[in-house]
Image (cartoon, coloured by chain):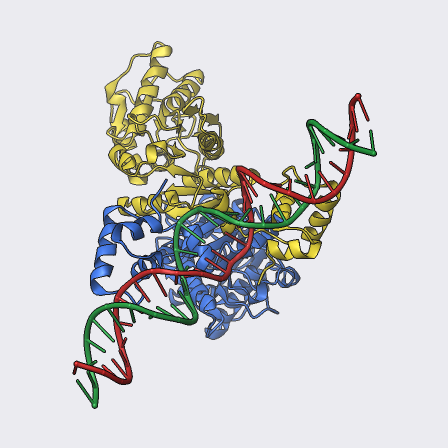
Chain colours: A blue, B yellow, C red, D green
Amino acid sequence: MALTMKDIAKMVGVSESTVSRAINGQPGVGQKTREKILTLVKEYQYQPNVLAQGLASQKTHTLGLLLPDITDPYFTQVVKGIEERASELGYHLILANTGGSREKEISYLTLFTQNRCDGIIFVGGSLAEEEILKLGLNKYPLVLVNKLLEELALPTLLLDHQQGAQMAGDHLIQLGHQSIGLVIGILDELTNFQLYEGYQEALNKADLTFDPNLVVEVENSRTGGYNGLLHLLELDNPPTAIFAAGDYLAVGVVEAIKTGGYLIPEELAVIGYGDTMVTEIIHPSLTTIKLPWKALGEGAVNQLMKAIEGNVEDPFIILLPEVIRRQST
Amino acid sequence: MALTMKDIAKMVGVSESTVSRAINGQPGVGQKTREKILTLVKEYQYQPNVLAQGLASQKTHTLGLLLPDITDPYFTQVVKGIEERASELGYHLILANTGGSREKEISYLTLFTQNRCDGIIFVGGSLAEEEILKLGLNKYPLVLVNKLLEELALPTLLLDHQQGAQMAGDHLIQLGHQSIGLVIGILDELTNFQLYEGYQEALNKADLTFDPNLVVEVENSRTGGYNGLLHLLELDNPPTAIFAAGDYLAVGVVEAIKTGGYLIPEELAVIGYGDTMVTEIIHPSLTTIKLPWKALGEGAVNQLMKAIEGNVEDPFIILLPEVIRRQST
DNA sequence: CTTTTTTACGCAACCGCTTGCGTATCTTGC
DNA sequence: GCAAGATACGCAAGCGGTTGCGTAAAAAAG
């Protein structure tokens, strides 16, 4: 059995309260006593029982992390950011992989709120407003990442996809392109729609006219990208550059271009979106928009800390992407 | 404040002990009382305080998960397997991303053993025997995944890389190849050495002579693979098939072959190792050896459960890979 | 050297749940 | 209808810490 505070107290010849105060750096302990206690603590490698601590102090120094899929490469970056920041602040993480199932989300959430965690970070996921309310989570320290519940004023961290698309457009325009094709997933999805808007905005700013024919809406996959590009090549005036609004789309696009025998970027430039690992693996390597997923995670922890302390100044934080230039433009 | 057991007890008009027993399905509670309690519990959504429970019962129903890098796509599969199985069994996970730093490993391990977790799963990582011993972990419920500490008889789960390489070799041999090149990372690394042995074994079994010239040892990366293949092409009798002992190596190899103007798989077949996502993204898609990472995670939890109960029958479990045939062979 | 203020420390209640043991109540058998 | 055994339940002592409050001792003030 591990050492308890009582043991330390007995060895030093003081009460448990004094030991507790000494360890936690609280006032009310004499210089010499404190040193004696701390020395013993070091020597015997005493570590307080976190459960007892949590029970007594109502603080667990643990954060609940809820996400739909831990194998998603974007989310792992978020997790890494969260873990690093949390660890710096002396917090630990309980991991809940929900697989997107509402049932699992609810079950984990109730567990988390049941005196297990000081706060919760909710990445993606499908839970809606009503359910959050029903669980009484709206006034629990909870931060949403990459997920917007408009009616709840919960602290939220998002990526500015609109801006990201605009940066992609700007990049191509700066390189002299006047006719830019957009290969994109279905616009019903919010992210895609935001990208679509950003694309338009970039054209507007540069006084280029928007041509709906240059936009192809496809399934967000490699084959989607492939077919999308073939479609664009059939136009009377095919574009000189493509914004493929997703890296997998971009891979398909690049493949289609190469199959068609065109040169990248000389005859057709391509920019992707997302900066997954595939962008460096294909040839030519892909210029893309890098999304600050890890920073999103770090920011989430910072926000959560504020939520725990009860003073979130600015509930909405929106992070900006960045252009990573490689060989395809 | 959440409901406590005392509240429930008061409502039903019994003592806390009875409530406790009713909830935990223990004997010593009358049929009617039990029902009354359970109804109230449902109605008010009472959930016991896990900290108090853990403190009193010395069981936390929590597992510690230690791994070097959560963004590694192999590890995430392991994590997924662990999470699913643990969740099935009513266990939760504390996540420790150590970045491979010993300091963090030790700090997390001591935390875990400090009444926080019922057991630990240690994936990869750099900690050596002595340190495990020093932490008194050799008799703590601990399972190693993808990491071998020979002198400690800790329950361990490994992948049979030797067998995997043999399967790769067999596959190529069955397709009629007699001269098989091996592009591999440095042989000092255990995994690579095992792959190397498996390759030889496959040749032996088929009565093919082993030619050291066909083996190139390179850095485990895309460029490593690229250069490795160029080297093989310079031989007087270049091989007709390549086993690239890693998917990234394989990507480089494929690139080099395509640059050289050869056809895959007609003139040169390629098989990779690992089945990361890249294998489906490159063209032609890569035949590869799939490693059962997720199963490794599930198995780890099963072993850990046995370790917690104190009866591990067979401490060493070795899982077999599988050939995934695609276009490159 | 006394009086007042400050500091150092102990006491004990509490956090919410578990569990061994004792007793009142209920069955069962004769 | 009563002794003996089984059953249902309560009591109270933990589990290992934290913390408000009271007091004795030390330091500062007069």
Q: Is residue B240 positioned above or below C12 on the image?
A: above
Q: Quadrant of residue B121?
A: top left
Give the quarter of the figure containing the N terminus of chain B. bottom right
Looking at the rendered structure, the number of numbered marks drawn on it comes to 0
Q: Is residue B220 positioned above or below A48 on the image?
A: above
Q: Looking at this view, is C13 or B169 the one in front?
A: C13
Relative to A211, A267 lies left or right: left
Residue B7, horizontal then vertical, whole percent: 63, 57
Q: Is residue A307 positioned above or below A84 on the image?
A: below
Identify which residue is drawn at 39% across, 18% down: B177
| Residue B128 visible (yes or no) | yes
Q: Quadrant of residue B229?
A: top left
Residue B87, horizontal then vertical, whole percent: 54, 41
Relative to B142, A185 lies left or right: right
Residue that protrudes farthest toward the top in the picture: B207
Residue A142, horizontal then vertical, whole percent: 52, 62
| Residue A272 visible (yes or no) | no
Residue C12, horizontal then vertical, whole percent: 44, 61
Identify which residue is drawn at 39% across, 30% down: B273
Q: Looking at this view, is C23 or A163 the one in front?
A: C23
Q: Quadrant of residue B159?
A: top left
